[in-house]
Amino acid sequence: MAYQSLGEKSLEYFPCRYGASKILFRGPKRDLKRDYIAVMGGSETYGKFVEHPYPELMEGLLGRQVVNFGCMNAGVDVFIHEHTILEACGRSSLTVLQVPGAVNLSNRFYVVHPRRNDRFVRASNMLKSIYQDVDFTEFNFTRHMLQTLQDSSAEKFAMVEAELKTAWVSRMKSLVARIESPLVLLWLSERGLADHCPKGILGTDPAMVDEEMINEIRPFVRDIVEVVVSPEDIAFGQQDLVYPEMDGAAAGCMLGVVAHDLTADALVGSIRVQG
C-alpha cells in the first residue's frame, strides 16, 4: 500500500470551520454565498487518507461547487445539533447525506460525545442494571463497548440493538425534516442495501442499519443512491491511500479511492437524471 513514512508530510486537509460550527471540516473553505451542493457524512465523506474525496470529484464532473461537510466518525447526532450546517444545507441547491451507522448516537442506554460520536461517554442506569457484571468505566469507544456487550450475552444485546435501531429511525426522521433543500441519501458500503445484515453485527458500515430502517426514511428523500464496493475494489483502492506508517491500521478500515470514484459517478448520475 502507498504511504508516506514517518517524518514526511501527510495529506493536507486544509481544516476549516463554517459560521458558528465547532466542527473542523475538510477544506479548502468554500464560498457559501455562491450556488453549491452540500454533502454531509462520516469518515468516507471527509476523505481520510484520500487525496481527492468524492465531493471534490463530483465538483469536477458537474462543474458546480460542492461543499464537503464530512466529519470523522460522525453519527446522526453530529449534524442534528449543528444548526449552522443545517442552515447551510437548507440554502444549498441539493444536499447529499451519507447514511450513518446506528451505533454512534445517544439513546436510552448510553451517551456519546456530541461531536465525536464514536466516543462513549457514559452508560445509563438502565444499561448498568441489565449488564451488572460489566465495568463501563473501561470503555472509551462505542464499538468496543458494544462488542463487549454482544459477546457477554446475545439475549441481552438484542434489547440494545432494538433500542439503537429505534433511536436511529427517530433521529434520522428528525434530521431529514430539518433539511430544507432536496435530499439524496447515499448508501456507501461493502454490503448491498437489501443484503441480510446478521443480527448484532457491528463491523460493516453503516453498522446496524438495514433496508427496513432505510424504508422508514425513503418517503422523505428525493433519491437513494446505493454504492456497493467489492472486496477487490477495496483492496485495489487502498493502495492509493496516503497515510503515515503509524496510521496503517486506520487506513485499512477505509474503503479506498476506487469507492470515491464509484460514489462520485453514481451521485452525479442521480443528479443529472433528477435535474
Image (spheres, rainbow, N blue to C red):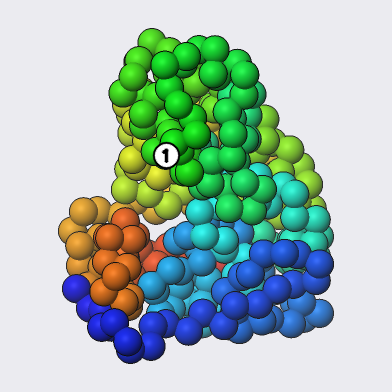
Q: Residue placed at 59% from the left, 34% from the top?
A: 122
Which image quadrant: the N terminus?
Answer: bottom left
Position of 173 with respect to 208 (left or right) is right
Find residue 149 and report its image quarter: top left
Q: Residue placed at 66% from the left, 48% from the top?
A: 114
Q: Residues within 10 Å of mark 1 (few under 14, many from 20)?
A: some
**Pointer 1: what residue?**
143
Q: Position of residue 272 (x, y in %)?
A: 56, 66
Q: Position of residue 220 (x, y in %)?
A: 68, 39
Q: Position of residue 171 (x, y in %)?
A: 67, 35
Q: Mark 1: which amino acid? A: Arg
Q: Is residue 114 above or below residue 258?
A: above
Q: Position of residue 175 (x, y in %)?
A: 71, 43
Pick the front one: 258 or 266 = 258
Q: Is residue 43 above or below residue 205?
A: below
Find residue 154 and report its image quarter: top left
Position of 42 with respect to 183 (left or right) is left
Let me know if residue 168 appears in the view: no
Pick the front one: 120 or 202 = 120
Q: Is residue 84 above or below residue 10?
A: above
